[in-house]
Amino acid sequence: MLSDAELSRYARQLPLPGWGPDGQRKLTDARVVVAGAGGLGSSVLTCLAAAGVGYIRIVDSDTVEMGNLNRQTLYTTGDIGKLKAPAARDRLAMLNPDIEVVSLAESISGENLSDVVAGCHLIVDALDNLPTRLLLNEVAVSRGLPLFHGAVYGFQGSATTVVPPQTPCLRCLYQGAVPGKVPVVGVTPAVIGTVEATEVVKFLLGMGDLLTGRLLMYDGLGMRFSEVKVKKDPDCQTCGQHHLPGGKPGR
């Protein structure tokens, strides 16, 4: 049973077809890890906390800098110098005190990857560097965890959803390209982060069509959305038939 406070807090989403109290409990029971608490993470975290996702683990080792504030809307000038993960946790606790938010002020590496995702049902990629994204991709594929990916550049962004083993993974998409530090205007990660959060909510509720096998592309200057299909690479180093754990062929 939802409490009176929950019925009031979620009153505008509960009437949606396929949602209701049962759907809200699915969100309450969900355990989500969000890797990155920057521009994308600010949007993703705010939306998931507001929707009532019951457990959110924030992973980010950086501190808040003045140059973050054009896009990282979880923070204020008074947060400069603070670690992002606990600062974001505290802000989300004020937004929705009924959920559990845990912060890990750590860099993601091969050594702590298992601990980063332990006990969680899905992974949100809100990072800004490809090597770490591909680490998340590897653990997602090896454990069969859905991975929700977003990326931004200036006024442009993209998003896709990986559901192993059925869909292409990030390695299939990026083919080893490693972009450097990119310019970005704050509205772009807000748009793409919201797309990622939408995909998470849809997945948890079993509603709608996910961005599986599709790359959604956003052009803010032209104000257009488009998409391209992404195919699974049979020779992918992560999800290809010769590279899956135990040598099992891909499905």
Image: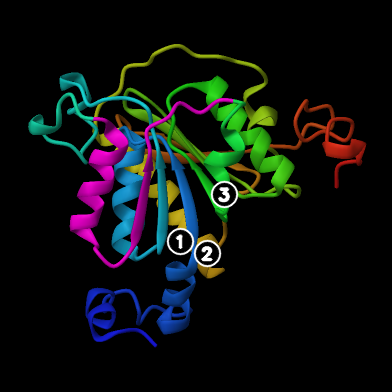
Name the residue beneath numbered marker 2: 204
Compared with 231, 167 (above or below) is: below
Q: Is label 2 in contact with label 1 (beta carbons under 8 Å)?
A: yes
Helix, strand or loop for disc 1 = helix
Mark 3 and mark 1: span between their CA atoms? 13 Å
Name the residue beneath numbered marker 3: 211
Is residue 215 visible to the viewer in this orientation of the structure?
A: no
Residue 41 location (% of width, % of height): 35, 39
Q: Tell me which residue sits at (35%, 59%) in the image.
A: 100
Query: In the rendered structure, does residue 89 fall within the stretch colored magenta?
Result: yes
Q: Is label 3 in contact with label 1 (beta carbons under 8 Å)?
A: no
Name the mark nearer the viewer: 3 or 2.
Answer: 2
Specify few, some or many for label 2: CA neighbours under 10 Å numbering under 14, 14-19, or 20 or more: some
Helix, strand or loop for disc 2 = helix
User: Which range of residues does the magenta coloring cover?
Assistant: 83-109
Is residue 198 visible to the viewer in this orientation of the structure?
A: yes
Compared with 172, 100 (above or below) is: below
Specify few, some or many for label 1: CA neighbours under 10 Å numbering under 14, 14-19, or 20 or more: many
Residue 193 location (% of width, % of height): 37, 43
Query: In the rendered structure, does residue 174 fall within the stretch colored magenta?
Result: no
Name the residue beneath numbered marker 1: 201
Q: Earlier in the sequence, mark 3 or mark 1?
A: 1
Quadrant into which the N terminus falls: bottom left
